[in-house]
Image: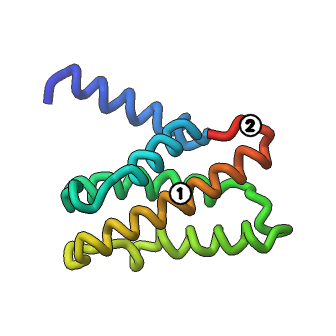
Amino acid sequence: MTVASTGKATELAEDSEAEDSSLDMAVISSRTETVLNLRMDTTTRAAMDGHLPGLAKGLNRLLGEDLGAEVDSEVRELVRRGTRLIDLTNRPTAETPAFGTFLYLRDVALVTRRLLWIYSERNGLDAP
């Protein structure tokens, strides 16, 4: 490992703590938009698999926020749905057909976008 990569690894480790303390709406929005623009006929399974970790991370981050689920049944249902989607037992596996993975990614992206909108409204932020 080179000195530059060691420094980068240290820098990333230090940045991860700051990254965990704030929600990057632009990144989450961009990831969901990218996934929703994928086409089944031109997207490889490897590309779909590559989008999964970042998309799930964004949804998981949103689920940790106060979205008003305790007072709004529609938000509560979205939170339940999002929680089910990111559960490791519900994620696509190597045996999942590409179409199943494609649909899963779209579901995660759609729920994430709705929760992101709720988060922005609840916190008086500009919609992503």
Residue 20: x, y in percent? 55, 43
Q: With respect to residue 5, does 108 lie above or below? A: below
Amino acid type shown at disc 2: Leu
Residue at mark 2 to residue at mark 1: CA–CA distance: 18 Å
Residue in the picture at 23% in, 55% down: 43
Q: Secondary structure at mark 2?
A: loop
Residue 124: x, y in percent? 80, 39
Q: Earlier in the sequence, mark 2 or mark 1?
A: 1
Which residue is tagged 2? 125
In the picture as drawn, the residue positioned furthest to the right comes out as 71
Judge by depth and name the residue closer to the eye, 125 or 24. Answer: 125
**Is 47 displayed left or right of 28 in the figure?**
left
Q: Residue 80 lies in what quarter of the image?
A: bottom right
Residue in the picture at 56% in, 68% down: 82
**Quarter of the picture holding the C terminus:** top right
**Quarter of the picture holding the N terminus:** top left
Residue in the picture at 71% in, 53% down: 118
Other residues around mark 2 within 10 Å, as few (<14) / some (14–19) / many (≥20):
few
Name the colouring of the figure.
Answer: rainbow
